[in-house]
Image (cartoon, helix red, strand yellow):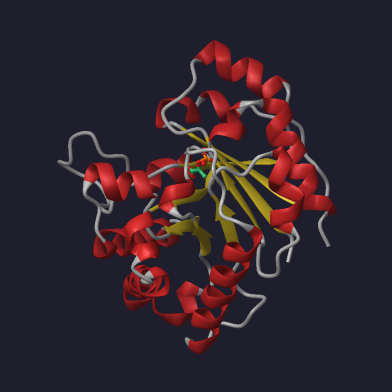
Protein backbone atom coordinates (compact mmCIF):
# COMPACT_ATOMS: atom_id res chain seq x y z
CA UNK A 1 0.00 0.00 0.00
CA UNK A 2 1.24 3.48 -0.79
CA UNK A 3 1.80 5.31 2.47
CA UNK A 4 -0.33 8.34 3.20
CA UNK A 5 0.98 11.38 5.06
CA UNK A 6 -1.64 13.93 6.04
CA UNK A 7 -0.83 17.31 7.55
CA UNK A 8 -3.42 18.60 9.99
CA UNK A 9 -2.91 22.34 10.18
CA UNK A 10 -5.55 22.61 12.93
CA UNK A 11 -6.65 26.22 13.61
CA UNK A 12 -3.43 27.75 12.34
CA UNK A 13 -2.42 29.83 9.37
CA UNK A 14 -3.20 33.03 7.52
CA UNK A 15 -3.34 33.80 3.83
CA UNK A 16 0.25 35.03 3.93
CA UNK A 17 1.60 32.24 6.13
CA UNK A 18 -0.10 29.58 4.03
CA UNK A 19 1.36 31.04 0.85
CA UNK A 20 4.81 30.82 2.40
CA UNK A 21 4.28 27.27 3.65
CA UNK A 22 2.94 26.06 0.31
CA UNK A 23 6.04 27.40 -1.39
CA UNK A 24 8.13 24.91 0.57
CA UNK A 25 6.00 21.85 -0.31
CA UNK A 26 6.21 19.58 -3.31
CA UNK A 27 5.09 16.07 -4.15
CA UNK A 28 7.33 13.22 -3.03
CA UNK A 29 7.09 10.19 -5.25
CA UNK A 30 5.95 7.00 -3.61
CA UNK A 31 3.86 8.68 -0.94
CA UNK A 32 0.40 10.25 -0.98
CA UNK A 33 0.43 13.70 0.60
CA UNK A 34 -2.61 15.53 1.94
CA UNK A 35 -3.07 18.95 3.49
CA UNK A 36 -6.02 19.25 5.88
CA UNK A 37 -6.57 22.98 6.11
CA UNK A 38 -9.07 25.11 8.05
CA UNK A 39 -12.32 25.60 6.11
CA UNK A 40 -11.75 29.24 5.02
CA UNK A 41 -8.45 28.32 3.40
CA UNK A 42 -9.82 25.55 1.20
CA UNK A 43 -10.42 28.20 -1.45
CA UNK A 44 -6.82 29.40 -1.27
CA UNK A 45 -5.62 25.81 -1.52
CA UNK A 46 -7.37 25.29 -4.82
CA UNK A 47 -3.97 26.40 -6.03
CA UNK A 48 -1.36 24.18 -4.41
CA UNK A 49 1.69 22.20 -5.43
CA UNK A 50 0.81 19.52 -7.95
CA UNK A 51 0.35 16.06 -6.48
CA UNK A 52 -0.81 17.24 -3.06
CA UNK A 53 -4.35 16.29 -2.13
CA UNK A 54 -6.68 18.47 -0.12
CA UNK A 55 -8.49 17.52 3.06
CA UNK A 56 -10.68 19.03 5.76
CA UNK A 57 -10.47 18.63 9.52
CA UNK A 58 -14.15 18.09 10.26
CA UNK A 59 -17.55 18.02 8.58
CA UNK A 60 -21.21 18.28 9.45
CA UNK A 61 -23.23 15.11 9.77
CA UNK A 62 -26.08 16.94 8.01
CA UNK A 63 -26.63 17.32 4.27
CA UNK A 64 -27.77 20.95 4.17
CA UNK A 65 -30.13 23.43 5.75
CA UNK A 66 -30.59 25.34 8.97
CA UNK A 67 -27.42 24.30 10.78
CA UNK A 68 -25.67 27.59 11.50
CA UNK A 69 -21.91 27.31 11.53
CA UNK A 70 -21.77 23.85 9.99
CA UNK A 71 -19.97 22.90 6.78
CA UNK A 72 -21.39 20.09 4.67
CA UNK A 73 -19.61 17.24 2.95
CA UNK A 74 -20.99 18.46 -0.39
CA UNK A 75 -19.25 21.81 0.17
CA UNK A 76 -15.96 20.10 0.96
CA UNK A 77 -16.24 17.93 -2.13
CA UNK A 78 -16.99 21.00 -4.25
CA UNK A 79 -13.75 22.57 -3.06
CA UNK A 80 -11.80 19.49 -4.11
CA UNK A 81 -11.32 17.78 -0.77
CA UNK A 82 -10.64 14.09 -1.08
CA UNK A 83 -10.06 13.37 2.63
CA UNK A 84 -11.87 14.50 5.76
CA UNK A 85 -10.67 13.90 9.31
CA UNK A 86 -13.47 12.69 11.58
CA UNK A 87 -13.32 12.09 15.31
CA UNK A 88 -10.05 13.86 16.00
CA UNK A 89 -9.40 13.68 19.73
CA UNK A 90 -9.64 17.47 19.99
CA UNK A 91 -13.17 17.31 18.55
CA UNK A 92 -14.03 14.48 20.93
CA UNK A 93 -12.53 16.12 24.04
CA UNK A 94 -13.19 19.83 23.45
CA UNK A 95 -16.44 19.71 21.47
CA UNK A 96 -18.11 16.68 22.99
CA UNK A 97 -18.19 14.52 19.86
CA UNK A 98 -19.17 10.96 20.64
CA UNK A 99 -18.59 7.70 18.81
CA UNK A 100 -22.00 7.65 17.14
CA UNK A 101 -21.62 11.18 15.76
CA UNK A 102 -18.18 10.29 14.39
CA UNK A 103 -19.83 7.36 12.60
CA UNK A 104 -22.50 9.60 11.06
CA UNK A 105 -19.85 12.05 9.89
CA UNK A 106 -17.98 9.20 8.21
CA UNK A 107 -21.22 8.28 6.42
CA UNK A 108 -21.60 11.88 5.17
CA UNK A 109 -18.00 11.96 3.91
CA UNK A 110 -18.34 8.69 1.98
CA UNK A 111 -21.68 9.75 0.52
CA UNK A 112 -19.83 12.55 -1.24
CA UNK A 113 -17.03 10.40 -2.58
CA UNK A 114 -14.37 11.43 -0.09
CA UNK A 115 -12.34 9.32 2.33
CA UNK A 116 -12.94 9.65 6.08
CA UNK A 117 -9.79 9.59 8.17
CA UNK A 118 -11.23 8.08 11.33
CA UNK A 119 -9.19 9.02 14.40
CA UNK A 120 -9.07 6.67 17.35
CA UNK A 121 -6.90 6.51 20.43
CA UNK A 122 -6.80 6.29 24.17
CA UNK A 123 -6.12 8.84 26.89
CA UNK A 124 -3.26 8.31 29.31
CA UNK A 125 -5.70 7.27 32.04
CA UNK A 126 -7.24 4.69 29.72
CA UNK A 127 -3.79 3.35 28.82
CA UNK A 128 -2.83 3.09 32.48
CA UNK A 129 -6.07 1.25 33.17
CA UNK A 130 -5.24 -1.31 30.46
CA UNK A 131 -8.14 -0.17 28.29
CA UNK A 132 -6.32 0.72 25.07
CA UNK A 133 -7.94 -1.83 22.81
CA UNK A 134 -11.34 -1.75 24.46
CA UNK A 135 -11.49 2.01 23.81
CA UNK A 136 -10.27 1.69 20.23
CA UNK A 137 -12.55 -1.28 19.55
CA UNK A 138 -15.50 0.78 20.79
CA UNK A 139 -14.50 3.77 18.63
CA UNK A 140 -13.99 1.64 15.51
CA UNK A 141 -17.07 -0.43 16.23
CA UNK A 142 -19.30 2.65 16.24
CA UNK A 143 -18.09 3.56 12.77
CA UNK A 144 -18.34 -0.02 11.51
CA UNK A 145 -21.91 -0.26 12.83
CA UNK A 146 -23.13 2.55 10.59
CA UNK A 147 -20.86 1.95 7.58
CA UNK A 148 -20.94 -1.81 7.30
CA UNK A 149 -18.05 -3.84 5.95
CA UNK A 150 -18.07 -2.67 2.34
CA UNK A 151 -17.84 1.01 3.27
CA UNK A 152 -15.47 0.40 6.16
CA UNK A 153 -13.01 -0.82 3.54
CA UNK A 154 -12.92 2.73 2.14
CA UNK A 155 -11.79 4.52 5.31
CA UNK A 156 -8.37 5.37 6.62
CA UNK A 157 -7.83 4.75 10.33
CA UNK A 158 -5.53 7.06 12.30
CA UNK A 159 -4.26 5.80 15.64
CA UNK A 160 -3.55 8.86 17.73
CA UNK A 161 -2.88 8.26 21.41
CA UNK A 162 -4.29 11.38 23.06
CA UNK A 163 -1.30 11.69 25.39
CA UNK A 164 1.06 11.87 22.41
CA UNK A 165 -0.74 14.63 20.49
CA UNK A 166 1.00 17.97 20.63
CA UNK A 167 3.07 16.91 23.63
CA UNK A 168 6.38 16.23 21.90
CA UNK A 169 6.17 12.76 23.39
CA UNK A 170 5.49 10.22 20.65
CA UNK A 171 4.39 6.69 21.44
CA UNK A 172 7.34 4.29 21.34
CA UNK A 173 7.97 1.98 18.43
CA UNK A 174 6.91 -0.95 20.64
CA UNK A 175 3.66 0.75 21.69
CA UNK A 176 2.84 1.66 18.10
CA UNK A 177 3.65 -1.85 16.88
CA UNK A 178 1.37 -3.38 19.50
CA UNK A 179 -1.63 -1.10 18.88
CA UNK A 180 -1.35 -1.11 15.08
CA UNK A 181 -1.13 -4.90 15.18
CA UNK A 182 -4.24 -5.01 17.37
CA UNK A 183 -6.12 -2.62 15.06
CA UNK A 184 -5.15 -4.76 12.07
CA UNK A 185 -6.37 -7.85 13.90
CA UNK A 186 -9.64 -6.05 14.76
CA UNK A 187 -10.17 -5.16 11.10
CA UNK A 188 -9.37 -8.69 9.96
CA UNK A 189 -11.71 -10.14 12.55
CA UNK A 190 -14.38 -7.97 10.95
CA UNK A 191 -13.66 -9.24 7.47
CA UNK A 192 -11.34 -6.47 6.25
CA UNK A 193 -8.11 -7.80 4.78
CA UNK A 194 -4.69 -6.43 5.70
CA UNK A 195 -4.16 -4.53 2.46
CA UNK A 196 -7.57 -2.84 2.38
CA UNK A 197 -7.40 -0.15 5.07
CA UNK A 198 -4.45 2.07 5.85
CA UNK A 199 -3.62 2.65 9.50
CA UNK A 200 -1.81 5.95 10.14
CA UNK A 201 0.06 6.84 13.29
CA UNK A 202 -0.29 10.34 14.74
CA UNK A 203 1.13 11.97 17.84
CA UNK A 204 4.31 14.04 17.89
CA UNK A 205 5.54 12.48 14.67
CA UNK A 206 8.49 14.53 13.47
CA UNK A 207 11.54 14.16 11.22
CA UNK A 208 13.60 12.68 14.07
CA UNK A 209 11.27 9.74 14.72
CA UNK A 210 9.58 9.35 11.33
CA UNK A 211 11.85 6.67 9.86
CA UNK A 212 11.61 4.48 12.96
CA UNK A 213 7.82 4.81 13.16
CA UNK A 214 7.23 4.20 9.44
CA UNK A 215 9.33 1.04 9.67
CA UNK A 216 6.86 -0.47 12.15
CA UNK A 217 4.63 -3.16 10.62
CA UNK A 218 1.07 -1.94 9.93
CA UNK A 219 2.08 1.72 10.01
CA UNK A 220 0.81 2.85 6.62
CA UNK A 221 1.48 6.53 7.04
CA UNK A 222 1.11 9.40 9.44
CA UNK A 223 -1.20 12.16 10.59
CA UNK A 224 0.98 15.14 11.38
CA UNK A 225 -0.03 18.14 13.47
CA UNK A 226 2.66 20.56 14.60
CA UNK A 227 5.35 19.41 12.17
CA UNK A 228 3.03 19.94 9.20
CA UNK A 229 3.27 23.70 9.79
CA UNK A 230 6.99 23.64 9.10
CA UNK A 231 7.54 22.98 5.41
CA UNK A 232 10.92 21.32 5.66
CA UNK A 233 9.78 19.09 8.53
CA UNK A 234 6.67 17.96 6.66
CA UNK A 235 8.77 17.26 3.58
CA UNK A 236 11.30 15.28 5.62
CA UNK A 237 8.49 13.19 7.12
CA UNK A 238 7.06 12.52 3.65
CA UNK A 239 10.47 11.46 2.37
CA UNK A 240 10.86 9.13 5.36
CA UNK A 241 7.47 7.59 4.51
CA UNK A 242 8.51 7.08 0.90
CA UNK A 243 11.83 5.53 1.90
CA UNK A 244 10.45 3.14 4.52
CA UNK A 245 10.20 -0.44 3.29
C1 LIG B 1 -2.77 15.66 15.41
O1 LIG B 1 -3.33 16.60 15.96
O2 LIG B 1 -3.40 14.94 14.62
C2 LIG B 1 -1.35 15.41 15.73
C3 LIG B 1 -0.85 14.25 15.45
O3 LIG B 1 -0.67 16.45 16.31
P1 LIG B 1 0.91 16.51 16.63
O4 LIG B 1 1.63 15.92 15.43
O5 LIG B 1 1.20 17.94 16.83
O6 LIG B 1 1.13 15.67 17.85
Image quarter in which the N terminus is found: bottom right
Tell me: 26 left or right of 8.
right
Where residue 213 appears, x then y in whole percent?
69, 55
Where residue 204 appears, x then y in whole percent?
56, 42
Which residue lies at the image location 24% right of the left edge and 43% below the top edge?
Answer: 95
Which residue lies at the image location 61% right of the left edge and 56% below the top edge?
Answer: 172
Q: Quadrant of residue 106?
A: bottom left
Tell me: 116 left or right of 2.
left
Confirm whether residue 65 shows in the render: yes
Where residue 214 appears, x then y in whole percent?
72, 56
Instruction: Identify which residue, 91 or 108, lies in the foreground.
Output: 91
Q: Is residue 182 above or below residue 93?
A: below
Q: Quadrant of residue 51?
A: top right
Confirm whether residue 51 shows in the render: no
Q: Is residue 142 above or below residue 41?
A: below
Tell me: 234 left or right of 185.
right
Q: Is residue 167 above or below residue 150?
A: above
The residue positioned farthest toward the front in the image shown: 128
Q: Is residue 115 above or below residue 139?
A: above
Image quarter in which the C terminus is found: bottom right
The residue positioned farthest toward the left in the image shown: 66
Which residue lies at the image location 76% right of the left edge and 37% below the top edge?
Answer: 236
Instruction: Identify which residue, 239 or 76, lies in the foreground.
Output: 239
Where residue 59 appears, x then y in whole percent?
35, 46
**Count of marks, rendered view:** 0
Tell me: 82 left or right of 74.
right
Amino acid sequence: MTRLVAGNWKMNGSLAANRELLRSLSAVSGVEMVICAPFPYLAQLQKRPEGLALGAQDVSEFEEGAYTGEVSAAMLAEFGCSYVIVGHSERRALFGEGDALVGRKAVAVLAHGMVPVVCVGETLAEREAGEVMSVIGRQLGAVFDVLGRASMRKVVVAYEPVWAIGTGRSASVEQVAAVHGDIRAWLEANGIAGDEVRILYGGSLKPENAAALFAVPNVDGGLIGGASLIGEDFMAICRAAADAV
